[in-house]
Image (tube, rainbow, N blue to C red):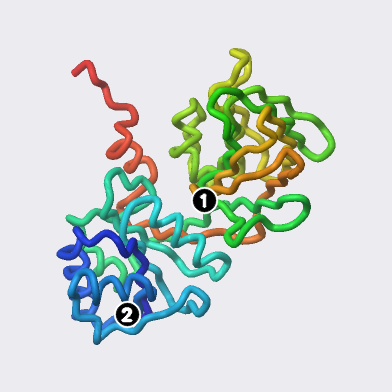
């Protein structure tokens, strides 16, 4: 099995965890390849012997399993790089909350047995495709979590006309608007009052950010809808964030959001589940009166 290693090359404080993982993989005779910027960081910043590990570029990716070493941001970046290659991704949490990551650093000595014995399932996660004026937006125009349009001028709101096809859903007067996948329901959308959604649900969530109308609430829509957003602001510009990757846009730019024609494959180890993650990491359902 060829295992691809992705991670944040600046997380030098995690050297011990990186070394433990690499040593465990090598002792189990996996073919290990490290993403080139991380490979360089291992050698130059962390003084890790990388002579036994091959390296790969982001334009030449092939393997059986990708390990994302870091937090949720690292996993989102890994998903953006892998794109439509259908390589399963297992997140190993070396950050803080790490809701998307399935393995904690305390489980490093044990999770390899799950991989060798194929004691895991693959979850197919919805991806959003973003277009601007009819063309794909930027180098990575796909989002696993969410797309957010946000005001750039701190002193004034923006107006967002959101359409499904030719029908107006609503005009949102707010600080921004989030279109989230089920995966992203526990991220930015949740922080502005959006619902928690099971990952396999075929829906999208539209959530306003600091709406200027109290009768506007998050809306759940089918993921078959194609959304069209027209944005107006006093500064004639706004920000669009695609899984945290930001672009400055003009009022003349029209945004289209739809479900992409591929999914991201997320590995879920045996005995791990979305509900268990909710309870352990977000304290979902906890009775604080006890």
Residue at which label 2 appears: 32
As drawn, 151 above or below 101: above
| Picture coordinates of residue 129, whole percent (x, y) | 65, 53
**In 3D space, how far apart are the residues under numbered discs 1 and 2 (Cα atoms)?**
29 Å
Helix, strand or loop status at disc 1? strand
Give the residue furthest to the front: 235
| Picture coordinates of residue 207, whole percent (x, y) | 58, 30
In this view, the residue in front, 181 or 192, is 192
Q: Residue at x 22, y 62 (%)?
A: 12
Q: Is residue 141 left or right of residue 61?
A: right
Residue 284 location, quadrant: top left
| Picture coordinates of residue 124, whole percent (x, y) | 52, 57
In this view, the residue in front, 12 or 229, is 12
Q: Is residue 91 left or right of residue 153?
A: left
Q: Is residue 121 left or right of residue 152?
A: left
Mark 2 Cα shell of 10 Å, populated few (<14), some (14-19), many (≥20): some
């Amino acid at each position: 099995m060829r295992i691809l290693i992705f991670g944040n090359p600046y997380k030098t404080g995690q050297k011990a965890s990186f070394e433990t993982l690499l040593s465990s993989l090598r002792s189990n005779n996996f073919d290990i390849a490290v993403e080139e910027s991380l490979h360089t960081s291992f050698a130059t910043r962390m003084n890790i012997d990388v002579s036994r590990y091959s390296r790969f570029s982001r334009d030449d990716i092939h393997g059986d399993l990708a390990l994302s070493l870091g937090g949720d941001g690292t996993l989102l970046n890994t998903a953006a790089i892998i794109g439509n290659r259908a390589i399963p991704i297992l997140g190993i949490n070396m950050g803080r909350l790490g809701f998307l990551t399935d393995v904690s650093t305390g489980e490093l000595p044990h999770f390899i047995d799950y991989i060798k014995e194929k004691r895991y399932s693959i979850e197919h996660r919805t991806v959003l495709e973003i277009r601007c004026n009819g063309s794909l937006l930027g180098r990575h125009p796909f989002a696993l979590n969410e797309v957010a349009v946000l005001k750039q001028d701190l002193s004034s709101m923006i107006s967002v006309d959101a359409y499904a096809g030719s029908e107006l859903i609503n005009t949102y007067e707010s600080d921004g608007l989030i279109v989230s996948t089920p995966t992203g329901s526990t991220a930015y959308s949740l922080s502005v009052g959006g619902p928690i959604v099971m990952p396999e649900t075929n829906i999208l969530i539209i959530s306003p950010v600091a709406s200027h109308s109290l009768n506007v609430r998050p809306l759940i829509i089918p993921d078959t809808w194609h959304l069209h957003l027209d944005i107006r602001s006093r500064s004639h510009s706004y920000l669009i964030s695609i899984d945290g990757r930001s672009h400055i846009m003009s009022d003349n730019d029209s945004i289209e959001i739809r479900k992409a024609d591929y999914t991201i494959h997320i590995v879920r180890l045996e005995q791990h589940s979305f509900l268990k993650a909710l309870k352990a990491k977000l304290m979902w359902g906890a009775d604080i009166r006890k």
